[in-house]
Image: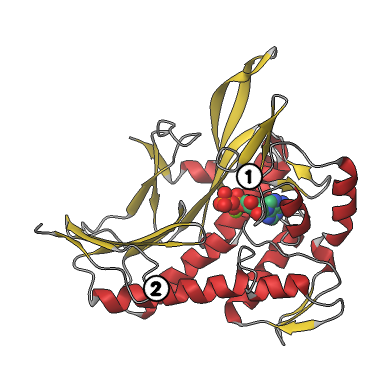
Amino acid sequence: MPGNVSYAPSADGAARVAYRQASRLSTLRGETMGTTWSVRLPGDAPALPGLVSALEHTLDDYVAQVSHWRPDSLLSRFNRAEPGSAHVLPDAFAAVIEAAIAIARETDGAFDPSLGALVDLWGFGAGERLDHPPAAEAIDAARPATGWRRLRFDAVTRTLVQAGGVRLDLSGIAKGHAVDLLGARLSDLGLRDHLVEIGGELRASGNRPDGRPWRVAVQGVGADAPPTGITIALRDQAVATSGDYLRYFDHDGQRYAHTIDPRDGRPVDSGIASVTVVHADCLHADALATALTVMGADEGFSYAERRGLAALFLLRDPIDPRHPRREVIRVKPTPAFLTLSSHE
Ligand code: ADP
Ligand code: MG
């Protein structure tokens, strides 16, 4: 089919890669971190097979370092390591842990990269999913193993010390970081105009083929929801969304979603359906979206306003208190977000 070519899977056969040439826009695709990645570039993706394997290599290398879904990753080995053991981290792992600790400090622990034990306990980790909350005693028993202040990281020697039983979980930041790593790889290869996406987290650099900024649409609430109708122009910026509607379970009329409030060890129930953050890099957009979700509709919104963050909150407003499931979604942008967005 002219202008629409599918390539055979690359070296390890893992990725499904499609190459489409339409309106002078090439799209590369594959799978990583339990989701999909895509890269959009103007024109014919040059030297395509080499480019795809370069991007896959970047992703595979990162996953081998920080995935808590892989028992053999460096992160999983750290999580099992002896108390007091010191671990010299490779570049990407060191960069993400340093940033994660800084964001934990800035958000007063709303974002916390050390919640692995609780995330697993609630069934949002690598183990089995649950359809009911764990016992209160189990939550109390898991909490002492958590807490970002227990992470001892020396940025100069890139050494992280296992305090004992600490289980890192970087799922709230790693996709965003991986988007940045792909963007950096493309720029290194001289491909400055690009739009990178992993599982809905995006980063734009340069322009679209028509010379205008990349534009992205903010999705609605839920897998089949209509779009919000809000689009954002991204100028060398990234965007990430945390939502309560992709990973959750319902029990006794209550929704338990995958973001944990470190203050009580339970899923947050803040009336936030999703938070979208636009930031200079995707690592921060991703982690801050998670942090604002934990802070909740009021505190999170004022935090974002005070810091001049561009954030869009989609809030669940009950229509009738007797029927908590009957709700409207209220859209609440920060002033900084309004300068980026438009209705189309
Ligand atoms: P996704 O983009 O996969 O929907 P998010 O960026 O919203 O994920 O992050 C949610 C994930 O982060 C959870 O599945 C869990 O693994 C982890 N997590 C949960 N609570 C927190 C928290 N308070 N701080 C940091 N990470 C968290
Ligand atoms: Mg996040």
Label 2, ligand 1: CB separation under 8 Å: no
Position of 157 compared to 189: left or right? right
SS under mark 1 = helix
Residue 67 location, x and y as percent?
60, 67
Spot the residue most to the bottom.
Answer: 157
How many numbered markers are drawn?
2
Residue furthest left in the image: 2
Residue 338 lies, in percent from the top left, at 48, 41
Q: Using the image, tell me which numbered label, if any, was put on residue 261.
A: none
Residue 270, above or below 92: above
Q: Residue at x 72, y 87 (%)?
A: 157
Percent across and percent down for residue 221 are: 50, 34
Task: Specify the quadrant of the image occupied by residue 317.
Answer: top right
Label 2, residues with CA under 10 Å away: few <14, some 14-19, many ≥20:
many
Instruction: Say what amino acid the circle numbered 1 marks.
Output: Glu
In the rendered image, the vertical position of residue 108 relative to residue 275, given as above or below? below
The residue where tag 1 is placed is: 305
**Residue drawn at point x = 55 percent, y = 27 percent:** 330
Quadrant in the picture for residue 271: top right
Please indicate, yes or no, whether residue 99 appears anywhere in the rendered image. Answer: yes
Q: What is the C-alpha distance between the residues marked 1 and 2?
A: 36 Å
In the rendered image, residue 225, in percent from the top left (x then y), is placed at 44, 31
Viewer-closest of 276 and 47: 47
In the rendered image, the quadrant that contains the N terminus is bottom left
The amino acid type, in three-letter code, at marker 2 is: Leu
Q: In the visual, does 5 lie left or right of 215?
A: left
Q: Nearer the viewer, residue 126 or 113?
A: 126
Q: Name the residue located 39 percent from the left edge and 74 percent from the top edge.
A: 12
Q: Which residue is mark 2?
A: 55
Q: Is residue 320 above or below residue 316?
A: above
State left or right for residue 17 relative to residue 173. Answer: left
